Amino acid sequence: MTTDVTISAPPGSETAAYRWRWAALFVILAAEVMDLLDAMVTNIASPTIQTELGGTPATIQWLGAAYTLSMAVGLITGGRLGDIYGRKRMFLIGAAGFTVGSLLCAVAQSPDLLVGARVVQGLFGAVMLPQGLGMIKEMFPPKEVGAAFGIFGPVMGLSSVGGPILAGWLIDADFFGTGWRMIFLINLPLGLAAILAGLRFLPESRSPHPLKLDVPGVVLASLAGLLLVFPLVQGRENGWPVWSFVMMGASAAIFAVFGWFESHKSRAGGDPLVVPSLFRKQAFTGGLLTGLVFFSAMAGFTLVFNLYTQIGLGYSTLKAALVMIPWSLGMVVGFGLAQAVKRFGRKVLQGGVLIMTLGTLGVLLTIDLAGMGVTPWQFVPALVVTGLGMGLLMAPFFDIVLAGVEQHETGSASGTLTAIQQLGGAFGVALLGTVFFDLLAGAPSPDIAGAMRVVLWVVAGMLLATFLAAFLLPKEAREEEHAGH
Protein backbone atom coordinates (compact mmCIF):
# COMPACT_ATOMS: atom_id res chain seq x y z
CA MET A 1 0.00 0.00 0.00
CA THR A 2 1.22 3.52 -0.72
CA THR A 3 1.11 4.58 2.91
CA ASP A 4 3.51 1.80 3.93
CA VAL A 5 6.36 3.50 2.08
CA THR A 6 5.67 6.81 3.77
CA ILE A 7 5.44 5.44 7.29
CA SER A 8 8.54 3.28 7.06
CA ALA A 9 10.76 6.08 5.80
CA PRO A 10 13.80 7.03 7.87
CA PRO A 11 13.00 9.22 10.88
CA GLY A 12 13.74 12.86 10.25
CA SER A 13 13.44 12.71 6.45
CA GLU A 14 10.80 14.71 4.62
CA THR A 15 9.23 11.52 3.21
CA ALA A 16 8.46 10.49 6.79
CA ALA A 17 5.58 12.98 6.71
CA TYR A 18 2.35 11.13 5.87
CA ARG A 19 0.19 13.09 3.41
CA TRP A 20 -3.08 12.90 5.40
CA ARG A 21 -1.42 13.20 8.81
CA TRP A 22 -3.49 16.16 10.06
CA ALA A 23 -6.79 14.55 9.03
CA ALA A 24 -5.62 11.30 10.63
CA LEU A 25 -4.72 13.21 13.79
CA PHE A 26 -8.31 14.43 14.15
CA VAL A 27 -9.61 10.87 13.71
CA ILE A 28 -7.33 9.79 16.54
CA LEU A 29 -8.48 12.75 18.62
CA ALA A 30 -12.12 11.73 18.09
CA ALA A 31 -11.29 8.38 19.70
CA GLU A 32 -9.53 10.14 22.57
CA VAL A 33 -12.58 12.35 23.09
CA MET A 34 -14.86 9.30 23.30
CA ASP A 35 -12.55 7.71 25.85
CA LEU A 36 -12.17 10.79 28.02
CA LEU A 37 -15.88 11.59 27.91
CA ASP A 38 -16.70 8.10 29.10
CA ALA A 39 -13.94 8.06 31.68
CA MET A 40 -15.35 11.21 33.29
CA VAL A 41 -19.11 11.25 32.69
CA THR A 42 -19.98 8.74 35.38
CA ASN A 43 -18.33 11.03 37.94
CA ILE A 44 -21.11 13.54 37.42
CA ALA A 45 -23.86 11.04 36.61
CA SER A 46 -23.22 8.46 39.35
CA PRO A 47 -25.67 9.88 41.96
CA THR A 48 -28.45 9.92 39.34
CA ILE A 49 -27.56 6.42 38.12
CA GLN A 50 -27.51 5.08 41.67
CA THR A 51 -30.93 6.62 42.36
CA GLU A 52 -32.46 4.94 39.30
CA LEU A 53 -30.69 1.57 39.27
CA GLY A 54 -29.81 1.20 42.97
CA GLY A 55 -26.49 0.03 44.37
CA THR A 56 -24.06 1.02 47.13
CA PRO A 57 -21.25 3.61 47.43
CA ALA A 58 -18.95 0.95 45.97
CA THR A 59 -21.18 0.95 42.88
CA ILE A 60 -20.40 4.63 42.36
CA GLN A 61 -16.67 3.85 42.48
CA TRP A 62 -17.00 0.83 40.19
CA LEU A 63 -18.77 2.86 37.48
CA GLY A 64 -15.47 4.66 36.93
CA ALA A 65 -12.98 2.08 38.15
CA ALA A 66 -14.39 -0.82 36.06
CA TYR A 67 -13.82 1.22 32.91
CA THR A 68 -10.36 2.53 33.73
CA LEU A 69 -9.13 -0.74 35.24
CA SER A 70 -10.24 -2.90 32.30
CA MET A 71 -8.65 -0.39 29.96
CA ALA A 72 -5.44 -0.26 31.98
CA VAL A 73 -4.95 -4.02 32.03
CA GLY A 74 -5.68 -4.23 28.29
CA LEU A 75 -3.73 -1.24 27.00
CA ILE A 76 -0.26 -2.78 26.96
CA THR A 77 -1.72 -5.70 25.02
CA GLY A 78 -3.58 -3.31 22.73
CA GLY A 79 -0.36 -1.55 21.78
CA ARG A 80 1.30 -4.85 20.96
CA LEU A 81 -1.70 -6.02 18.89
CA GLY A 82 -1.19 -2.93 16.76
CA ASP A 83 2.45 -3.86 16.26
CA ILE A 84 1.48 -7.37 15.17
CA TYR A 85 -1.72 -6.98 13.15
CA GLY A 86 -1.53 -3.34 12.08
CA ARG A 87 -2.47 -0.17 13.97
CA LYS A 88 -5.19 0.92 11.55
CA ARG A 89 -6.95 -2.44 11.72
CA MET A 90 -6.84 -2.60 15.53
CA PHE A 91 -7.96 1.03 15.82
CA LEU A 92 -11.07 0.28 13.74
CA ILE A 93 -11.85 -2.93 15.66
CA GLY A 94 -11.46 -1.07 18.94
CA ALA A 95 -13.67 1.82 17.81
CA ALA A 96 -16.41 -0.58 16.69
CA GLY A 97 -16.31 -2.56 19.95
CA PHE A 98 -16.25 0.63 22.02
CA THR A 99 -19.36 1.87 20.22
CA VAL A 100 -21.17 -1.42 20.88
CA GLY A 101 -20.10 -1.26 24.54
CA SER A 102 -21.59 2.24 24.75
CA LEU A 103 -24.90 0.91 23.48
CA LEU A 104 -24.83 -1.86 26.11
CA CYS A 105 -24.27 0.79 28.82
CA ALA A 106 -27.22 2.80 27.54
CA VAL A 107 -29.65 -0.13 27.75
CA ALA A 108 -28.40 -1.62 31.07
CA GLN A 109 -31.18 -2.34 33.58
CA SER A 110 -29.12 -3.05 36.72
CA PRO A 111 -25.89 -1.82 38.34
CA ASP A 112 -24.15 -5.14 37.62
CA LEU A 113 -25.06 -5.04 33.93
CA LEU A 114 -23.90 -1.43 33.67
CA VAL A 115 -20.56 -2.19 35.34
CA GLY A 116 -20.14 -5.18 33.00
CA ALA A 117 -20.84 -3.00 29.97
CA ARG A 118 -18.27 -0.51 31.25
CA VAL A 119 -15.73 -3.37 31.24
CA VAL A 120 -16.59 -4.03 27.57
CA GLN A 121 -16.04 -0.34 26.79
CA GLY A 122 -12.71 -0.36 28.59
CA LEU A 123 -11.39 -3.50 26.89
CA PHE A 124 -12.18 -2.28 23.37
CA GLY A 125 -10.92 1.19 24.28
CA ALA A 126 -7.65 -0.54 25.22
CA VAL A 127 -7.45 -1.89 21.67
CA MET A 128 -8.28 1.50 20.11
CA LEU A 129 -6.31 4.11 22.07
CA PRO A 130 -2.65 3.01 21.95
CA GLN A 131 -2.76 2.87 18.15
CA GLY A 132 -3.22 6.64 18.10
CA LEU A 133 -0.01 7.53 19.94
CA GLY A 134 1.92 5.05 17.80
CA MET A 135 0.57 6.49 14.54
CA ILE A 136 1.24 10.09 15.61
CA LYS A 137 4.84 9.16 16.35
CA GLU A 138 5.21 7.64 12.87
CA MET A 139 3.09 9.99 10.71
CA PHE A 140 4.79 13.24 11.70
CA PRO A 141 8.38 14.31 11.03
CA PRO A 142 10.36 15.31 14.14
CA LYS A 143 9.82 19.04 13.56
CA GLU A 144 6.02 18.58 13.65
CA VAL A 145 5.67 16.03 16.45
CA GLY A 146 5.62 18.73 19.12
CA ALA A 147 2.85 20.60 17.29
CA ALA A 148 0.82 17.38 16.94
CA PHE A 149 1.07 16.63 20.63
CA GLY A 150 0.37 20.31 21.31
CA ILE A 151 -3.10 19.75 19.81
CA PHE A 152 -3.42 16.32 21.42
CA GLY A 153 -2.94 17.72 24.92
CA PRO A 154 -5.59 20.48 24.97
CA VAL A 155 -8.24 18.28 23.36
CA MET A 156 -7.63 15.63 26.02
CA GLY A 157 -7.70 18.20 28.78
CA LEU A 158 -10.82 19.98 27.58
CA SER A 159 -12.61 16.66 27.05
CA SER A 160 -11.82 15.55 30.59
CA VAL A 161 -13.42 18.72 31.93
CA GLY A 162 -16.09 19.11 29.23
CA GLY A 163 -17.30 15.53 29.71
CA PRO A 164 -19.01 16.21 33.04
CA ILE A 165 -20.53 19.44 31.68
CA LEU A 166 -21.96 17.60 28.71
CA ALA A 167 -23.20 14.81 30.99
CA GLY A 168 -24.93 17.27 33.32
CA TRP A 169 -26.65 19.00 30.41
CA LEU A 170 -27.79 15.73 28.79
CA ILE A 171 -29.17 14.36 32.07
CA ASP A 172 -31.05 17.57 32.86
CA ALA A 173 -32.37 17.89 29.28
CA ASP A 174 -33.67 14.30 29.44
CA PHE A 175 -33.95 13.95 25.65
CA PHE A 176 -36.65 11.45 24.65
CA GLY A 177 -36.91 10.42 28.30
CA THR A 178 -33.43 8.85 28.20
CA GLY A 179 -32.01 10.70 31.23
CA TRP A 180 -28.49 9.51 32.07
CA ARG A 181 -28.56 6.95 29.25
CA MET A 182 -27.95 9.68 26.68
CA ILE A 183 -24.38 10.14 28.00
CA PHE A 184 -23.62 6.76 26.43
CA LEU A 185 -25.90 7.01 23.38
CA ILE A 186 -24.00 10.09 22.20
CA ASN A 187 -21.02 7.80 21.52
CA LEU A 188 -22.92 6.05 18.71
CA PRO A 189 -22.61 8.86 16.09
CA LEU A 190 -19.11 9.72 17.35
CA GLY A 191 -17.98 6.11 17.03
CA LEU A 192 -19.49 5.69 13.56
CA ALA A 193 -17.82 8.90 12.36
CA ALA A 194 -14.45 7.75 13.74
CA ILE A 195 -14.76 4.40 11.95
CA LEU A 196 -15.69 5.93 8.57
CA ALA A 197 -13.01 8.63 8.76
CA GLY A 198 -10.47 6.07 9.97
CA LEU A 199 -11.09 3.88 6.92
CA ARG A 200 -10.31 6.87 4.71
CA PHE A 201 -7.50 8.73 6.44
CA LEU A 202 -5.54 6.45 8.80
CA PRO A 203 -2.29 4.98 7.43
CA GLU A 204 -1.38 1.30 7.44
CA SER A 205 1.22 0.96 10.16
CA ARG A 206 2.84 -1.90 12.05
CA SER A 207 6.18 -2.91 13.52
CA PRO A 208 8.80 -3.74 10.87
CA HIS A 209 9.84 -6.75 12.96
CA PRO A 210 7.75 -9.96 13.19
CA LEU A 211 6.20 -10.15 16.68
CA LYS A 212 4.18 -12.57 18.76
CA LEU A 213 1.72 -11.82 21.55
CA ASP A 214 3.12 -12.37 25.04
CA VAL A 215 0.15 -14.21 26.57
CA PRO A 216 1.78 -14.96 29.99
CA GLY A 217 2.74 -11.27 30.23
CA VAL A 218 -0.87 -10.27 29.49
CA VAL A 219 -2.14 -12.55 32.27
CA LEU A 220 0.41 -11.32 34.84
CA ALA A 221 -0.15 -7.61 34.11
CA SER A 222 -3.95 -8.00 34.17
CA LEU A 223 -3.93 -9.98 37.40
CA ALA A 224 -1.61 -7.52 39.15
CA GLY A 225 -3.83 -4.55 38.24
CA LEU A 226 -7.01 -6.28 39.34
CA LEU A 227 -5.49 -7.37 42.67
CA LEU A 228 -4.58 -3.74 43.41
CA VAL A 229 -7.82 -1.92 42.54
CA PHE A 230 -10.44 -4.51 43.58
CA PRO A 231 -9.62 -4.51 47.34
CA LEU A 232 -9.36 -0.70 47.38
CA VAL A 233 -12.90 -0.35 46.05
CA GLN A 234 -14.55 -3.34 47.71
CA GLY A 235 -12.56 -3.57 50.95
CA ARG A 236 -14.25 -0.60 52.66
CA GLU A 237 -17.71 -2.03 52.06
CA ASN A 238 -16.64 -5.33 53.65
CA GLY A 239 -14.97 -3.74 56.70
CA TRP A 240 -11.40 -4.11 55.41
CA PRO A 241 -11.06 -7.89 55.86
CA VAL A 242 -7.66 -9.60 55.82
CA TRP A 243 -8.13 -10.72 52.20
CA SER A 244 -8.12 -7.10 51.01
CA PHE A 245 -4.61 -6.53 52.35
CA VAL A 246 -3.43 -9.93 51.12
CA MET A 247 -4.62 -9.05 47.60
CA MET A 248 -2.77 -5.72 47.61
CA GLY A 249 0.42 -7.43 48.78
CA ALA A 250 0.00 -10.11 46.12
CA SER A 251 -0.40 -7.35 43.51
CA ALA A 252 3.04 -5.95 44.32
CA ALA A 253 4.56 -9.44 44.17
CA ILE A 254 2.96 -10.20 40.79
CA PHE A 255 4.10 -6.86 39.35
CA ALA A 256 7.64 -7.86 40.39
CA VAL A 257 7.23 -11.30 38.76
CA PHE A 258 5.93 -9.56 35.63
CA GLY A 259 9.04 -7.36 35.45
CA TRP A 260 11.34 -10.36 35.88
CA PHE A 261 9.44 -12.40 33.28
CA GLU A 262 9.59 -9.62 30.67
CA SER A 263 13.35 -9.15 31.17
CA HIS A 264 13.93 -12.90 30.95
CA LYS A 265 11.84 -13.19 27.78
CA SER A 266 13.73 -10.32 26.15
CA ARG A 267 17.14 -11.87 26.98
CA ALA A 268 15.93 -15.18 25.53
CA GLY A 269 15.13 -13.48 22.22
CA GLY A 270 11.34 -13.48 22.65
CA ASP A 271 8.80 -10.70 22.21
CA PRO A 272 8.00 -9.26 25.66
CA LEU A 273 4.77 -7.36 26.22
CA VAL A 274 6.75 -4.40 27.55
CA VAL A 275 10.11 -3.83 25.86
CA PRO A 276 12.67 -3.72 28.74
CA SER A 277 14.85 -1.18 26.90
CA LEU A 278 12.14 1.42 27.53
CA PHE A 279 13.01 1.44 31.21
CA ARG A 280 16.58 2.44 30.42
CA LYS A 281 15.24 5.73 29.05
CA GLN A 282 15.04 8.39 31.73
CA ALA A 283 12.24 10.29 29.99
CA PHE A 284 10.04 7.20 29.79
CA THR A 285 10.54 5.87 33.33
CA GLY A 286 10.19 9.33 34.82
CA GLY A 287 7.06 9.87 32.75
CA LEU A 288 5.46 6.66 34.01
CA LEU A 289 5.97 7.64 37.64
CA THR A 290 4.90 11.24 37.07
CA GLY A 291 1.80 10.18 35.13
CA LEU A 292 0.79 7.53 37.67
CA VAL A 293 0.75 9.98 40.58
CA PHE A 294 -0.73 12.89 38.65
CA PHE A 295 -3.60 11.02 36.99
CA SER A 296 -4.41 9.32 40.31
CA ALA A 297 -4.77 12.70 41.97
CA MET A 298 -6.89 14.21 39.20
CA ALA A 299 -9.28 11.28 38.71
CA GLY A 300 -9.86 10.90 42.43
CA PHE A 301 -10.34 14.64 42.96
CA THR A 302 -12.85 14.91 40.11
CA LEU A 303 -15.00 12.07 41.46
CA VAL A 304 -15.02 13.32 45.05
CA PHE A 305 -15.57 16.98 44.12
CA ASN A 306 -18.64 16.07 42.04
CA LEU A 307 -20.01 13.94 44.88
CA TYR A 308 -19.41 16.84 47.29
CA THR A 309 -21.26 19.40 45.14
CA GLN A 310 -24.24 17.12 44.43
CA ILE A 311 -24.67 15.17 47.66
CA GLY A 312 -23.23 17.75 50.06
CA LEU A 313 -24.24 21.07 48.51
CA GLY A 314 -27.40 19.80 46.79
CA TYR A 315 -26.44 21.01 43.31
CA SER A 316 -28.25 19.53 40.29
CA THR A 317 -26.18 17.50 37.84
CA LEU A 318 -26.01 20.44 35.43
CA LYS A 319 -25.12 22.96 38.13
CA ALA A 320 -22.44 20.65 39.51
CA ALA A 321 -21.02 20.27 35.99
CA LEU A 322 -21.05 24.02 35.33
CA VAL A 323 -18.96 24.58 38.45
CA MET A 324 -16.08 23.03 36.47
CA ILE A 325 -16.20 25.60 33.63
CA PRO A 326 -13.56 27.86 35.29
CA TRP A 327 -11.25 24.84 35.42
CA SER A 328 -11.80 24.35 31.67
CA LEU A 329 -11.12 28.01 30.88
CA GLY A 330 -8.00 27.98 33.04
CA MET A 331 -6.81 24.91 31.16
CA VAL A 332 -7.21 26.65 27.79
CA VAL A 333 -5.05 29.53 29.03
CA GLY A 334 -2.53 27.05 30.45
CA PHE A 335 -2.16 25.21 27.13
CA GLY A 336 -1.65 28.47 25.28
CA LEU A 337 0.89 29.72 27.80
CA ALA A 338 2.74 26.38 27.64
CA GLN A 339 3.32 26.84 23.89
CA ALA A 340 4.83 30.27 24.52
CA VAL A 341 7.27 29.04 27.16
CA LYS A 342 7.93 25.50 25.85
CA ARG A 343 11.65 26.25 25.49
CA PHE A 344 11.90 25.84 29.26
CA GLY A 345 10.98 22.13 28.91
CA ARG A 346 10.57 20.32 32.22
CA LYS A 347 10.27 23.56 34.16
CA VAL A 348 6.96 24.27 32.41
CA LEU A 349 5.56 20.95 33.60
CA GLN A 350 6.82 21.42 37.15
CA GLY A 351 5.54 24.98 37.28
CA GLY A 352 2.15 23.66 36.26
CA VAL A 353 2.19 21.17 39.14
CA LEU A 354 2.98 23.89 41.68
CA ILE A 355 0.22 26.13 40.31
CA MET A 356 -2.24 23.21 40.49
CA THR A 357 -1.23 22.65 44.11
CA LEU A 358 -1.96 26.30 44.90
CA GLY A 359 -5.33 25.97 43.18
CA THR A 360 -6.17 22.84 45.18
CA LEU A 361 -5.32 24.64 48.42
CA GLY A 362 -7.47 27.52 47.15
CA VAL A 363 -10.45 25.15 46.87
CA LEU A 364 -9.74 24.05 50.43
CA LEU A 365 -9.64 27.68 51.63
CA THR A 366 -12.89 28.44 49.80
CA ILE A 367 -14.67 25.57 51.58
CA ASP A 368 -13.25 26.68 54.95
CA LEU A 369 -14.33 30.30 54.54
CA ALA A 370 -17.74 29.82 52.89
CA GLY A 371 -18.88 26.62 54.60
CA MET A 372 -21.91 24.71 53.32
CA GLY A 373 -23.34 27.91 51.79
CA VAL A 374 -20.57 28.10 49.20
CA THR A 375 -21.73 29.18 45.73
CA PRO A 376 -20.32 28.22 42.31
CA TRP A 377 -18.97 31.77 41.87
CA GLN A 378 -16.85 31.42 45.00
CA PHE A 379 -15.05 28.43 43.50
CA VAL A 380 -14.09 30.36 40.35
CA PRO A 381 -10.67 31.78 41.39
CA ALA A 382 -9.32 28.52 42.79
CA LEU A 383 -10.59 26.38 39.89
CA VAL A 384 -9.17 28.79 37.29
CA VAL A 385 -5.75 28.48 38.94
CA THR A 386 -6.07 24.69 39.10
CA GLY A 387 -6.98 24.50 35.39
CA LEU A 388 -4.13 26.85 34.46
CA GLY A 389 -1.66 24.55 36.18
CA MET A 390 -3.15 21.46 34.58
CA GLY A 391 -2.80 23.00 31.10
CA LEU A 392 0.85 23.85 31.73
CA LEU A 393 1.49 20.29 32.90
CA MET A 394 -0.33 18.34 30.20
CA ALA A 395 0.78 20.33 27.13
CA PRO A 396 4.42 19.13 27.15
CA PHE A 397 3.87 15.81 28.97
CA PHE A 398 3.54 13.32 26.09
CA ASP A 399 6.17 15.03 23.96
CA ILE A 400 8.73 14.85 26.77
CA VAL A 401 7.98 11.25 27.73
CA LEU A 402 7.91 9.81 24.18
CA ALA A 403 10.85 11.87 22.91
CA GLY A 404 13.45 9.10 22.96
CA VAL A 405 11.28 6.12 21.98
CA GLU A 406 12.57 4.21 18.94
CA GLN A 407 10.27 2.95 16.17
CA HIS A 408 10.36 -0.68 17.28
CA GLU A 409 9.38 0.40 20.81
CA THR A 410 6.44 2.59 19.76
CA GLY A 411 3.59 0.14 20.33
CA SER A 412 4.90 -1.02 23.68
CA ALA A 413 5.68 2.55 24.82
CA SER A 414 2.33 4.08 23.83
CA GLY A 415 0.38 1.18 25.31
CA THR A 416 2.35 1.25 28.55
CA LEU A 417 2.11 5.03 28.95
CA THR A 418 -1.64 5.09 28.33
CA ALA A 419 -2.08 2.06 30.61
CA ILE A 420 -0.33 3.93 33.43
CA GLN A 421 -2.63 6.89 32.83
CA GLN A 422 -5.69 4.65 33.12
CA LEU A 423 -4.32 2.60 36.02
CA GLY A 424 -3.59 5.87 37.79
CA GLY A 425 -7.19 6.95 37.18
CA ALA A 426 -8.58 3.67 38.55
CA PHE A 427 -6.26 3.83 41.54
CA GLY A 428 -7.15 7.46 42.26
CA VAL A 429 -10.91 6.80 42.10
CA ALA A 430 -10.49 3.77 44.37
CA LEU A 431 -8.14 5.47 46.85
CA LEU A 432 -9.71 8.92 47.20
CA GLY A 433 -13.25 7.57 46.85
CA THR A 434 -12.51 5.14 49.67
CA VAL A 435 -11.01 7.89 51.86
CA PHE A 436 -14.10 10.04 51.25
CA PHE A 437 -16.68 7.32 52.00
CA ASP A 438 -14.66 6.02 54.96
CA LEU A 439 -14.71 9.47 56.59
CA LEU A 440 -18.46 9.77 56.05
CA ALA A 441 -19.12 6.29 57.45
CA GLY A 442 -16.96 6.90 60.51
CA ALA A 443 -18.64 10.16 61.56
CA PRO A 444 -21.68 10.27 63.92
CA SER A 445 -23.36 12.58 61.41
CA PRO A 446 -22.13 12.92 57.82
CA ASP A 447 -19.58 15.76 57.57
CA ILE A 448 -19.19 15.99 53.82
CA ALA A 449 -17.26 19.28 53.98
CA GLY A 450 -14.81 17.75 56.48
CA ALA A 451 -14.33 14.68 54.28
CA MET A 452 -13.73 16.93 51.28
CA ARG A 453 -11.07 18.87 53.20
CA VAL A 454 -9.16 15.68 53.96
CA VAL A 455 -9.32 14.61 50.31
CA LEU A 456 -8.00 18.00 49.19
CA TRP A 457 -5.00 17.68 51.53
CA VAL A 458 -4.29 14.23 50.09
CA VAL A 459 -4.55 15.61 46.53
CA ALA A 460 -2.13 18.44 47.39
CA GLY A 461 0.33 15.87 48.74
CA MET A 462 0.02 13.78 45.57
CA LEU A 463 0.68 16.85 43.42
CA LEU A 464 3.84 17.63 45.36
CA ALA A 465 4.91 14.03 44.79
CA THR A 466 4.28 14.62 41.07
CA PHE A 467 6.57 17.67 41.21
CA LEU A 468 9.38 15.59 42.72
CA ALA A 469 8.87 12.70 40.26
CA ALA A 470 9.19 15.15 37.36
CA PHE A 471 12.86 15.66 38.23
CA LEU A 472 13.41 12.28 36.56
CA LEU A 473 12.32 13.77 33.22
CA PRO A 474 14.89 15.36 30.88
CA LYS A 475 15.15 19.12 31.07
CA GLU A 476 14.26 19.61 27.42
CA ALA A 477 11.46 17.90 25.52
CA ARG A 478 13.59 16.72 22.59
CA GLU A 479 17.03 16.23 24.12
CA GLU A 480 16.89 12.44 24.25
CA GLU A 481 15.69 12.28 20.65
CA HIS A 482 18.56 14.42 19.43
CA ALA A 483 20.99 12.27 21.35
CA GLY A 484 19.50 9.12 19.81
CA HIS A 485 19.82 10.36 16.24
Image: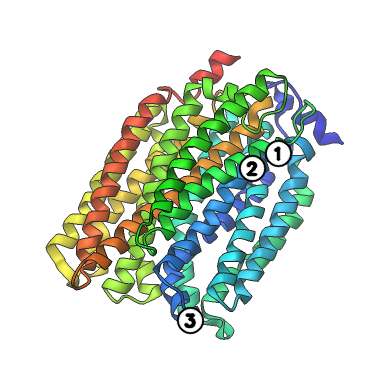
Kind of element beneath mark 2: helix
Q: CA distance from mark 3 to mark 1?
A: 40 Å
Name the quadrant of the C terminus.
top right
The kind of residue tagged 2 is: Val
Left or right: 68, with 194 as reference point:
left
Q: Earlier in the sequence, mark 3 or mark 1?
A: 3
Q: Is residue 156 above or below residue 165?
A: above
**Where is residue 345 drawn, in percent x and y?**
41, 27
Left or right: 466, with 16 as reference point:
left
Marks 1 & 2, CB-CB < 8 Å contact? yes
Compare residues 407 and 465 and report the one nearer the observer: 465
The kind of residue tagged 3 is: Glu
Q: Which residue is mark 3?
A: 52
Q: Can residue 140 be seen in this snapshot? A: no
Q: CA distance from mark 1 to mark 2?
A: 6 Å
Q: Which residue is mark 2?
A: 219
Mark in front: 3 vs 1: 1
Q: CA distance from mark 2 to mark 3?
A: 36 Å
**Where is residue 315 drawn, in percent x and y?**
32, 75
**Where is residue 153 drawn, in percent x and y?**
49, 44
Q: Residue furthest front?
A: 242
**Where is residue 243 drawn, in percent x and y?**
43, 52
Q: Which residue is mark 1?
A: 215
Left or right: 441, with 33 as reference point:
left
